Amino acid sequence: MTTATGGERGCASGMLRAMAERGKRWSALTAGQRNAFLAAMLSWTLDALDFFLLIFCMPAIASGFHADVARVAEAVFLTLALRPVGALVFGAAADKWGRKPTLVVNILCYSAAELGCAFAPSLGALLALRAVFGVAMGGVWGVGAALAFETLPTEGRGFFSGLLQEGYAIGYLLAAGAFGAGFHWLGWRGLFALGAVPVLLVPFVVRGVSESPVWLERRSRRAAKTGWRERVRELRGHLPVFVFLILLMTAFTSFSHGTQDMYPTFLLKGAGFTAALVGVIGVVYNVGSLAGGMVFGSLSERWGRRRAIMAAALLAMPIVPLFAYGRSALALGAGAFLMQFMVQGAWGVVPAYLTELSPASLRAVLPGVAYQLGNLLTSRNLVLQTRLAERLGSFRPVLAGTVVVAGLALAAVTALGRESRGARIGAE
């Protein structure tokens, strides 16, 4: 048995000290700040749960409707393609009428769409419902991030960014657990009905969360009453930033969806694992996602946002052989854990980075639309990955190639951006 080196022990103890320091910062938050952050994170977590239930259930849905998996994968394309519409609609509503009421409506919409999927009479109906779900899903991230970061203090923003973004990983974790424990008993329709649970978050947001103080300050200055023409004019003034964010989020979504969306199908059909084992592995690699987001989010406070993103993207490369070519459940589970540690490590910096780069009057709409346009531009990636895997007769080279291409692209685009660590998030 090998023992840890002094450097490894020092690194581990340093991480523990950093986490303890972040814990103190969490305890130093006011009740209002905690509630705003929890509302943003939980709405994003439960939204991700609803999204990833489809990912785990694709083979079963294909079987139930007598279709191939690539046809069911069109549902993922529709969800991703319609998310920019939701980001624009809900983001504009949040900038005009407030973060809190918009978030409430947003949660109700995606919960209703998910419940409807449980009763879809045909694959066509399911695809239509997933398109509606995509619109609702598209609004949550931008609205929630604006509410959270306009309420939180500047100190420790990187850590909270990592924690907020990893609500997505927690949603994946919950979906994996639900699939592994409940699919045998509930089937895919029962799991979609379970996906209506986010509606229970609404009373907490209504009663326990206050409106963003930055948005209230803007409203008091009548800035929130800016018309559409002024908004468009302002967006044109920030066009270089907007274009950069779209390119950045295109690389990001290729990196994450390219390593996540096909992986359960690969484990089921390519590796021949049972649904229960796939659920366990899903839980394992989402623990890695959660840890990576918090670690690199915290590191971005010391290294800067850009350096933390680039480091995580490049460190994913050496993990490819284990992630895509492991020959046992243990090897693939370890590879998936390490891969998602790096993938979501890079993603953990995103909420803070995009919010810091955005002007106050467009803070709910600009980051959200850029994020979701990145999803739109990569919305057919899963379909293309699946068809390529079918043509090659193996998922492994497709997964490996995706990591290399997307990881290098992400590092290159990030290098073109400007640093934003410590930027003030105010009403102007």
Image: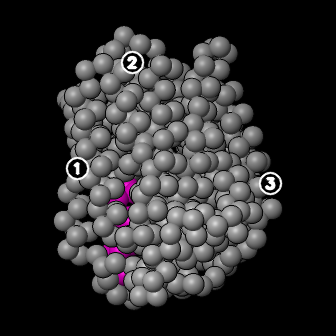
The residue closer to the viewer here, 111 or 347, is: 111
Q: Is residue 299 left or right of residue 163?
A: right
User: In this orientation, does residue 325 appear?
Assistant: no
Q: Is residue 25 above or below residue 208?
A: below
Under circle 1, the secondary element is: helix
Q: What crowding class fits label 2: few (fewer than 14 Cα within 10 Å), some (14-19), or many (20 or more)?
A: some
Residue located at (33% from left, 15% from top) = 65
Against 186, residue 363 (above or below) is below
Which amino acid type is shown beneath numbered disc 3? Ala
* Residue at (58, 70) in percent of width and height: 230
Identify the disc placed on residue 197: 1
Residue 2 at what x, y percent from top left?
63, 56
Q: In whole angstroms, how far apart are the C-alphas of marks 3 and 2? A: 38 Å
Q: Residue at x 24, y 31 (%)?
A: 118
- What residue does disc 2 label? 62
Q: Residue 316, relative to residue 425: is it above or below?
A: above
Residues in magenta, as a range: 33-45
Is residue 141 one of those drawn in magenta? no
Q: Residues within 10 Å of mark 1 (few under 14, many from 20)?
A: some
> Please, what is the three-letter code of the amino acid marked with disc 2?
Ala
Q: Say the numbered circle drawn on residue 412.
A: 3
Disc on the earlier residue, 3 or 2? 2
